[in-house]
Image (cartoon, helix red, strand yellow):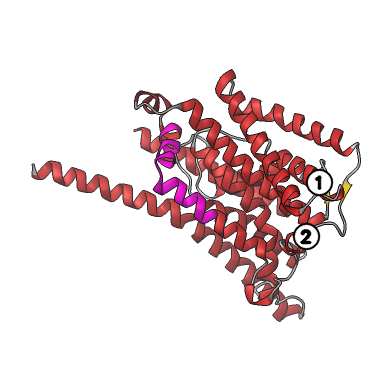
Amino acid sequence: MAQTNSIEAAGRSRLAIRRLTTFAGPLVWLLLVFCLFWGADEYRQSSTGVGGKFASISSLQTVGRNASLVGVAALGMTLVIIAGGIDLSAAASAALAATIAAWCFRAGYPAAVGVSAGILTGVTCGLINGALVSSLRVVPFIITLGTMTIFRGIGREIAEGTPIRAFGKLPDWLVRLQEPKPNPEWLLVTPGVWVMVGLALAVAAILHLTVFGRHVYAIGSNEATARLCGISLTRTRIAVYSLAGFFAGVAGLYTLANLSEGDPNSLPGRELDIIAAVVIGGGSLSGGRGSVIGTLSGALLMEVIRHGCRSLSVPTAYEQIIIGVIVIVAVSLDQIRQRRLAR
């Protein structure tokens, strides 16, 4: 009996350490990278007199604002990846949502209609993805690769080949969502960042406080076991992709707030940033693991690198190389962790 209790205690200890690593690891990397660029910027300022603004309030506000769009969409991607899926159409869904919302605003519909249309567009895109993945039983990578081009094509057809401009027709609160400076100033960061934080808390509650959240983790960890436990794989997958579509729709509103127009060609390549934010944040492409804190840390980490490279006048090519290396390292560490768990 004593030996059994000892083994159980050791198992609980390893599980606690693993969870702590999953949550704290991305935050540690974010802090280290931030301090690295901060130190480099201060050294440059002391030696050349140029720089010294990387850690300023204005700089931090810019980082948060720029990371919020990817961060919001990545919250939905977190659910998808934990469930063992992938969604390459996230950016295309957001662009389509922005296009349809802009069309509604340009046509003079009330703000509630434009906002609802954009979000419902994202949810519909997610619903289509979930239904196709569940019914066709084709790997999500292929399904969402196809829907990515379909959603882009639908957006181009609606926009008739040109961006749908809605200058002066957007509600003030939507424009303020992504303003360079917080309005009002006491918010400290732009409203879009606070919306992202609120949505992040909601996703965390869904994952850790609901039966649905447990089902998402179960499907990603072991699909066969989840089926034997009576979990409806089809219903859960459709719900997961629909939720991801909701967050893509919100990201579309962020895009509209940034550009004041709906462009179906906007956000090119952003789907890779969205996926990378989850992976860098500790999410496993094999499913069953991921966290909201990790995802937001991943989104902020990429933006800190971009902002730091610009502050130090580092060429864009090196910025892309650094982010690519970090993604490869994150995936490699995940694979090493998976092999250790399989022993």
Which mark, by number, is residue 171?
2
Inspect the magenta stretch and tell me whether residue 175 lies in it: no
Q: Residue at x 73, y 71 (%)?
A: 181
Residue placed farthest to the left in the image? 1
**Which residues, given as a range, are shown in magenta?**
200-219
Does the magenta stretch mainly form a helix, a strand or a loop?
Answer: helix
Residue 99, given in percent of the width and then of the height, sits at: 80, 43
Q: Nearer the viewer, residue 111 or 15?
A: 111
Q: Are marks 2 and 1 in contact (CB under 8 Å)?
A: no
Which mark, by number, is residue 150?
none
Residue 27, given in percent of the width and then of the height, sits at: 50, 59
Residue 271, given in percent of the width and then of the height, sits at: 68, 42
For residue 337, above or below residue 49: above
Q: Secondary structure at mark 1?
A: helix
Image check: 218 left or right of 200? left
Where, by quadrant of the figure, is residue 30 drawn?
bottom right
Image check: 222 left or right of 99? left
Image check: 277 left or right of 211? right
- Res 106 visible: yes
Inspect the magenta stretch and tell me whether residue 209 lies in it: yes
